[in-house]
Image (spheres, rainbow, N blue to C red):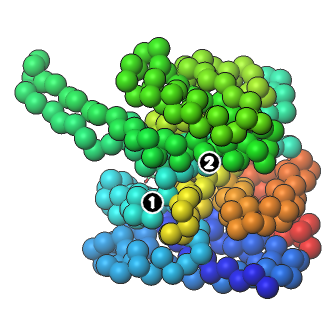
């Protein structure tokens, strides 16, 4: 019997609605499986919590989370209550950084029954491995002077360790998939970090002779996501390139409401965190119309992470059977509620 302890942080806005939906689905999944059980512990850390306690989480928050096998997060942020830089850095980004979740994994694929904005999409199924700890998102730099002489300098940081780690992760993943890795580069324009990135990619590739590789400049790659996404399988990208590319990935799938993400701690020293790509969607919060699929697919990624890939496949197939029969929320052109879609998935799982 595999027993998994999961810290659940619904957070703000629709986070609370979609986490409840996905948690019920995970319970249904473990019921059918038998050999697997989940124990969820809820943490009410959110903007509301901040107003009551003056912090997004208690002082021993990280220590408490470290006792769990995984963190299941909805969304953080309610700019009417707390400025975004305070709420996100006090919870979401704090967990990513302090738990050394150095890989951000984001899939993009054609979902049956969900219309892609692409005209005639072929059947694409991409996994972007984004370096999540350094690169262009570094706090090194500064500003000087004022007015017309003002200067801003922002440094990008590429360490061999973190770059290799992202690439090994991508190659290991490719071995389980189609055996192809594409590196997102820009060594024709960025003359130190990207040639370094290319060199590390070539070095790491030598340990995986069975995996096919290619390198694409990020601008061309972004265009190919729109014109020929079926060309790609696993893509490894720096923090900024991966961030932009995965938003394009969510867009070509048809809605940000269905896109999932996993923040992986590769060493296993700390828990990994599973969250959808979307935010708290204040414009639709409380109405019961949020699309739960991003959170449910995130749950599938958590199953994969715990070695339950077969169950993960069953879950995603069930979601697709529901979407292809027209059980769709408003954001993807339907009229069903969060609950309708969730109940239908649970019924079919059983
Ligand atoms: P958002 O992702 O919350 O919403 C953007 C648009 O997509 C809205 O029109 C929303 O209704 C729609 N949408 C998002 N998720 C949906 C779903 N599951 N079903 C149906 N429609 C959905 O981004 P926005 O509005 O820029 O940010 C709102 C708040 O969320 C801010 O405080 C922001 O900082 C925070 N945020 C948090 C993230 C996280 O926790 N990972 C990520 C992005 C934003
Ligand atoms: Mg983004």
Q: In x, y percent, where is residue 299? A: 70, 64
Mark 2: give few (<14), some (14-19) or many (20+) Cα within 10 Å. Answer: some
Residue 312, relative to residue 45: is it above or below?
A: above
Residue 288, relative to residue 124: is it above or below?
A: below
**Which numbered marker is on residue 56?**
none
Q: Residue furthest top?
A: 188
Mark 1: give few (<14), some (14-19) or many (20+) Cα within 10 Å. Answer: many
* Among the 4 quarters of the image, the one containing residue 300: bottom right
Total numbered labels placed on residues in the image? 2
Residue shown at 45%/60% (left/top)?
100
Q: Estimate the spatial distance between the alpha carbons at disc 2 and disc 1, rounded to whole Å.
A: 15 Å
Disc 2 is placed on an element classified as helix
Residue shown at 83%/23% (left/top)?
120
Residue shown at 64%/34% (left/top)?
206
Going by the image, does 159 lie left or right of 6?
A: left
Label 1 C-beta lies within 8 Å of the nearest ligand 1 atom: no
Residue 195, relative to residue 163: is it above or below?
A: above
Residue shown at 76%/26% (left/top)?
231
Q: In x, y percent, where is residue 147? A: 9, 23
Quadrant of the drawing holding the N terminus = bottom right
State the residue position of label 2: 169
State the residue position of label 1: 100
Disc 1 is placed on an element classified as loop
* Among the 4 quarters of the image, the one containing residue 288: bottom right
Decide if residue 234 is in sight here: no
Q: In x, y percent, where is residue 59? A: 31, 79
């Amino acid at each position: 019997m595999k027993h998994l302890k999961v810290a659940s942080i619904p957070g703000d806005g629709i986070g609370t609605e979609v986490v409840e939906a996905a948690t019920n689905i995970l319970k249904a999944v473990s019921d059918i499986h038998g050999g697997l059980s989940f124990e969820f512990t809820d943490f009410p850390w959110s903007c509301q919590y901040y107003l009551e306690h003056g912090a997004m989480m208690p002082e021993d928050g990280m220590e408490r989370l470290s006792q769990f096998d995984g963190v299941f997060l909805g969304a953080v942020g309610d700019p009417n209550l707390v400025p975004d830089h305070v709420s996100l850095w006090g919870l979401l980004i704090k967990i990513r950084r302090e738990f050394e979740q150095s890989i951000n994994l984001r899939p993009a694929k054609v979902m049956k029954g969900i219309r892609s904005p692409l005209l005639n999409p072929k059947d694409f199924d991409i996994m972007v491995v984004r370096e999540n700890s350094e690169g262009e998102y570094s706090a090194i730099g500064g500003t000087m002077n004022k007015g017309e002489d003002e200067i801003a300098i922002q440094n990008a940081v590429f360490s061999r360790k973190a770059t290799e780690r992202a690439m090994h992760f991508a190659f290991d993943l490719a071995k389980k998939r189609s055996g192809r890795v594409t590196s997102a580069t820009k060594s024709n324009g960025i003359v130190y970090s990207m040639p370094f990135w290319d060199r590390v990619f070539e070095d790491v590739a030598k340990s995986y002779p069975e995996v096919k590789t290619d390198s694409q400049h990020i601008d061309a790659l972004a265009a190919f996501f729109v014109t020929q996404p079926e060309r790609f399988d696993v893509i490894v990208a720096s923090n900024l390139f991966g961030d932009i590319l995965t938003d394009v990935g969510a867009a070509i799938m048809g809605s940000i409401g269905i896109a999932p993400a996993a923040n992986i701690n590769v060493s296993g020293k700390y828990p990994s965190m599973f969250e959808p790509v979307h935010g708290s969607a204040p414009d639709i919060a409380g109405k019961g119309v949020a699309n739960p699929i991003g959170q449910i697919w995130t749950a599938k990624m958590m199953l994969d992470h715990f070695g339950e890939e077969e169950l993960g496949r069953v879950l995603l197939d069930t979601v697709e059977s529901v979407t292809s029969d027209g059980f769709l929320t408003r954001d993807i052109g339907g009229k069903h509620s969060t609950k309708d879609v969730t109940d239908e998935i649970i019924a079919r799982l059983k």
